Amino acid sequence: MGEREHGRREHVRVAVIGTGFGGLGAAVRLRREGITDFVVLERAGSVGGTWRDNSYPGCACDVPSHLYSFSFAPNPDWPRTFSGQPAIREYLEHVADTFGLRRHIRLDSEVRMMRWDAEELHWEIETDTGELTADVVVSATGPLSDPKMPEIPGLAEFPGKVFHSARWDHDYDLAGKRVAMIGTGASAIQIVPAIAPDVERLTLFQRTPPWVMPRTDRAISTAERWLHRQLPFTRAARRGLLWGIRELQVSAFTKRPNQLGLVEALAKANMARSIKDPALRARLTPSYRIGCKRILLSSEYYPALARPNVDLVASGLKEIRGSVLVAADGTETEVDAIVFGTGFHVTDMPIADRVVGAEGKTLADEWKDGMRSLRGATAAGFPNWMTIIGPNTGLGNSSMILMIESQLNYMADYLRQLALLDGSSLGGKVALAARPSAVNTWNRHVQARMERTVWNTGGCTSWYLDAQGRNTTVWPGTTGEFRKETRTVDLAEYEVIRAQDRDRGRERIPVPVGATAGPAAAAARSGRAAKAVAGAPAAAPAAAPTTGPAGAPAAAAGEGAA
């Protein structure tokens, strides 16, 4: 692996955190960039990220399978048009094996703390299995990794079984039990149809009804799979069509939410086919614009709610008295088990409490008024630290792997620039720190675009919004636009920090406005880096990024979690 030693601690060029799509994708890209001096730290005992943790009954992807793989690792053998969790986890294991990632992965190595050493210009990392240092940290823990459990009075005294959908207890048999399902999000609408036939009684506590569209899932035939293996262009064409349709849908979400009225009518028709009781339909009909919350896909959810052993309580859970659950509207239900489908810590990611930056502040402190980053990747005050699926990189209608691969492009160019600056004529180790002015400019631009979107104007409260009501989660544009915005690193948006002799302190090296880095000729990039280090005038605040029409990303890929 080419590991080096700093004192008694192991030192690596890059430490990647997590082995979901983001972490494994970063590892593959590092190897393709010729970087083998890296580790991938994983807190669990196997790879897979959210697709390892979410193994509940019915767990499946809500993005078509052929838009659900890396561009560098297409899968011609997806079993279904919307594949289930076992197939997706198997795909991730296949990626780890095919690209030789096992030698870099350290399982059962949860990161306890990461601290930036301003003198040595590296990260000090404490894990369950020891300590190490790294020049660069790539955090790929993902927003759907830490379950959120509500604080319900009396929950601690509940005598029955309690677990979150992302921590499913497969040793507990729900058959013949009275079960409460708390929440009506993407996991709940898959769990309800899967367990309803087996339980004695299922009570669904619904605080806010979701919009649900049918999911046209089917088995992919043997002939189709053979065709995709023998003629790869057919697989690429299928993928491109799926991608293009979703790109065309974006403007309705981001610029013209009123155009979504037809989609609402289709969703209501989907409900009416299965729910014949007008009173139940009324309780299941949302009062906000479709798309404001995540649009859910299921052809089985409404039929399950029409079963005689399934009850809907159109109210949130207020308290628990022994084995009796009390809703906010006073409804009382006695149950044997409670399943929480209450989402994840998305806008308050727990990893942020474990990252201490250049000024001694945690990332959580830096983001206490809302997550902010530069191009969804880097944060002010945290040199040589990057995140995959960072602030405002989520999607409301397409595949997250598109965004992940765009961020991997940015990561690769970031590392190229560090290597060029390390080898500049002045010598010495360097780090890149996002300028606060650039972070603020980027976020003003993103939030200005967000004002017109359905996520901000649709009349709902969703997990897209943080405690201040800001949408720090979703990207207000197409995946093609994001690919364009993250194709290369603009050095004008960064301070270059170089380690000097300790008695001389640290020197911050200014970068000229317009000094950019990208996939141009190596000599040209090296020349720009050398000029930056040579003492050019300090950069002015970066101009607001512009977005515009962009072509389809080459061999685009996609992801969406159930």
Image: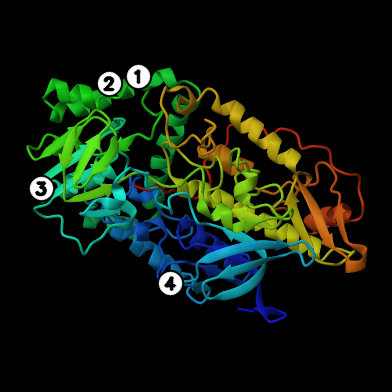
CA separation in Å, label 1 and label 2: 6 Å
The colour scheme used here is: rainbow
Q: Earlier in the sequence, mark 1 or mark 4?
A: 4
Q: What residue is shown with label 2?
A: 265
- Which numbered circle lies on residue 29? none
CA separation in Å, label 3 and label 2: 29 Å
Q: Is label 4 or label 2 in front?
A: 2
Residue found 15% across the figure and 55% down from its top:
174
Q: Earlier in the sequence, mark 3 or mark 2?
A: 3
* Amino acid at dot 3: Pro
Q: Are marks 3 and 1 in contact (CB under 8 Å)?
A: no
Look at the picture and state if 352 lies above or below 446: below
Q: Are marks 4 and 3 in contact (CB under 8 Å)?
A: no
Q: Are marks 3 and 2 in contact (CB under 8 Å)?
A: no
Relative image position of residue 379 (x, y in whole percent)? 66, 48
Give the left or right position of residue 448, taking residue 214 as reference: right
Q: Earlier in the sequence, mark 3 or mark 1?
A: 3
Q: Quadrant of residue 273?
A: top left
Label 4 environment density (alpha carbons within 10 Å; few <14, some 14–19, many ≥20): few
* Amino acid at dot 4: Asp
Q: Secondary structure at mark 3?
A: loop
Q: Is residue 189 visible?
A: no
Look at the picture and state if 226 lies above or below 540: below
Label 3 environment density (alpha carbons within 10 Å; few <14, some 14–19, many ≥20): some
Q: Secondary structure at mark 4?
A: helix
Label 2 environment density (alpha carbons within 10 Å; few <14, some 14–19, many ≥20): few
Q: Are marks 1 and 2 in contact (CB under 8 Å)?
A: yes
Q: Is label 4 or label 3 in front?
A: 3
Q: Secondary structure at mark 2?
A: helix
Q: What residue is shown with label 1?
A: 261
Q: Earlier in the sequence, mark 4 or mark 2?
A: 4
